[in-house]
Image (cartoon, grey):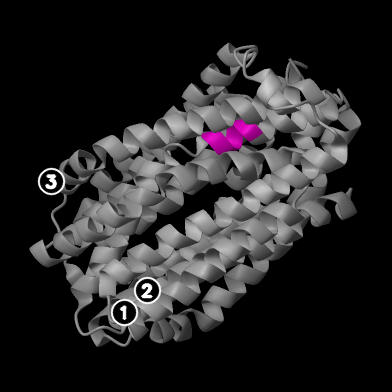
Amino acid sequence: MHRQVLLLAIPMVLSNITVPLLGLVDAAVIGHLEHAWYLGGVALGSTMISVAFWLLGFLRMSTTGLTAQAFGANDPEKLVRVLLQGCLMALGFAVVFLLLHRFISNWIFSFSDASEQVKFYGQQYFVIRAWSAPASLMNFVILGWLLGTQNSKAPMWMVIITNITNIALDILFVVGFGWKVQGAAAASVIADYAGLSFGLLCIWKYWQANQLPSLWNKIGGSSEGLSRFVKLNRDIFLRSLCLQAAFSFMTFQGAAFGDHTVAANAVLMSFLMMISYGMDGFAYAMEALVGKAIGAKSETQLKAAMVGSAFWCVIICTLLTFAFGYWGSALIHLISDIPQVREEANVYLPWLVAMPLSSMWCFLLDGIFIGATKGKEMRNSMVISTTAFFSMFYLFSPYGNHALWLSMLSFMIIRGLSLAMVLAGQWKREVFFA
């Protein structure tokens, strides 16, 4: 099982490393411009576009769980149906988002207390990035489907190609052409479509190799199992809404503390994303293996997947803790040469050092519940955790930005604890497979 876990997790960890690397390059390229508000604007705009897209991240999660269960049950008809339902839903959401993106931009940024310069460049970034919606949402479905079929190499190259393209174009557009914030946004749009093209090629190759039923012949029967698909997506959407509320509040409230604080938080959030995407690699492996075990109705496979993934997560998070403790300040200096931003980021760095080992459990348990397609339990856990996040902030708000980071650390810990309690209860009552 250790071999299976690593074969699924390592490619996703390697590919996910390029995601925070992209964030670091964005921050470094923009952070070396002459004013802090460029970095603050990119941080605010990218956070808001991430909110818009990741609220629809249920498309990947539900697709992974349902596909893995169909794969474990050796049901090719369901494999095709899950892909078709996911793609149609993704394109539908993309069309709606493109029609409303300017209204959404004006509405979201009206709540920000950031300076006028930061808000201006944030909106500029958002409006351009909106045009990547069809590719971004389709990529969620394709990634989820490929992972569900126990294939992590194709998603790995899909993510790597997207992010390396983004990094290269980022440097070309911002440094080479001098397009500043607009260049960073345009680079991301082009990169998303490059990733989509590669993902579709991977789907086509898998289809041919496994002789799956024709996709077009299944369009008429695509409503089969749709009710379960919609309910699962609804619950994961509400869970994602709570998650994004917490992360968005970090950016918005940080902006209220000043331009240098929001820029410092953007640097540290890049580190947090490094933790998140590293742990997501093992969470993805957990989703695929748990879904496969449930589809095959094998409790032995399920236990082995859980133990194997947890073992390697502890090792990875221990290494990340030491890395942030010893080299965190050097990384901050590498990202920005603005003295006030460096000073602010170093003040709050200890919160990042505490994050890896505290937060790993919520990622692992998310993987278990996604693979088991238990959306309701994930939704309820996230509501509890988000309530705790905002309660902690308002309780400790006199401490300013420290209160924000304390709230985020508490949020991660409570997510893990609440899901662990649900899992233990369902396992004891022997209803987890139900």
What is the magenta range? 59-63
Quadrant into which the C terminus falls: top right
Q: Earlier in the sequence, mark 1 or mark 3?
A: 1
Q: Say if 309 sits above or below 342 in the image.
A: above
Q: Which residue is mark 3?
A: 110
Q: Residue furthest left?
A: 116
Judged left or right of residue 71, residue 158 is left
40 or 105: nearer the viewer: 105
Residue 123 at x, y percent in the picture? 21, 56
Q: Which residue is mark 2?
A: 27
Q: Which residue type does callout 2 highlight? A: Ala
Please tell me whether mark 1 sits on a helix, a strand or a loop: helix
Query: Residue at left 26%, top 51%?
Result: 396
| Tag 1 near tag 2, CB within 8 Å | yes
Q: Say if 413 sits above or below 87 in the image.
A: below
Q: Which residue type does callout 1 highlight? A: Gly
Residue 280 at x, y percent in the picture? 62, 52
Q: Earlier in the sequence, mark 2 or mark 3?
A: 2
Query: How many marks can you see?
Result: 3
